[in-house]
Amino acid sequence: MKKMLIMGPPGAGKGTQAEYIVKYYNIPHISTGDMFRAAIANKTEVGLLAKKYIDAGNLVPDEVTVGIVKERLANPDCKNGFLLDGFPRDLKQAEMFAVMLKELGIDLDLVINIHVDNEKLINRIIGRRICPECGRTFHIKYNKPLKDGICDDCGSSLIQRKDDNVETVSNRLDVYQSKTEPLINYYKDLVVTFDGDRDVDVIFNDIKKVIGDK
Ligand code: AMP
């Protein structure tokens, strides 16, 4: 039961739970947002194309996104499981994803949905800090690093994501609600919803109970 998607609005703690899950189950974390941020940092063709969409909080065109996901899922390390994070983002991507899964002979096992009420999300996003080196996520109030501004894992200085600002956040939340949230119904037979407004360890324990043994 390890071929999984994780969903949730920006700021729900999806990235943090994703980090816990992939570490514990030793499966690849396929985050389209992380792949785009790495492509931007490395100034690749995909990065140059994606940057303007990401900076505005809009979705990157499907042909770019679907291509990078398919290439990644075809990698042999995904054979025994994976956690896809940030994809599919709307119904059209979900339909393209269904075709892709069929072509690759993959059956999806579980869709993890992290729920947090809308009014709490903005603060959670504005206070978020990420490690530019290893990608680990922190929060200045709810998930503090041991030393202010420094990544617990690799010692790099934490930064704020460029799209984690008040202006972009409300657009991202609107995009999530209008485009991504309908996927909860699309995947209703596979979805399990978790209350994301709890301690990270408590949420992770609940998720483990659903996924099962390593
Ligand atoms: P995330 O890290 O998941 O919040 O993604 C950051 C940004 O990357 C989003 O606001 C989009 O601009 C872009 N992005 C990530 N995943 C996708 C996707 N599946 N389709 C289109 N754009 C995406």
Image (cartoon, rainbow, N blue to C red):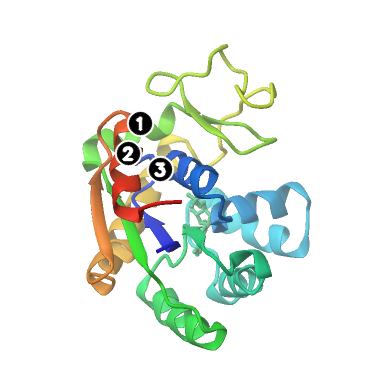
Under circle 3, the secondary element is helix
In the rendered structure, are the residues bearing label 2 and label 1 in contact, judged by CB atoms less than 8 Å apart? yes
Circle number at residue 205: 2
Circle number at residue 129: none
Q: Is residue 74 left or right of residue 10?
A: right
Under circle 2, the secondary element is helix
Furthest toward the front, the residue is 213
Across and down, in percent, residue 109 comes to 37, 68
Residue that carries the numbered disc 1 in the rendered image: 201
- In-front residue for pair 88/178: 88
**Disc 1 residue type?**
Asp
Across and down, in percent, residue 105 comes to 52, 84
Quadrant placement of the N terminus: bottom left
Across and down, in percent, residue 116 comes to 25, 42
Query: Cα distance, mark 2 to mark 1?
Result: 6 Å
Badge 2: how crowded within 10 Å, few (<14), some, or many (20+)? few
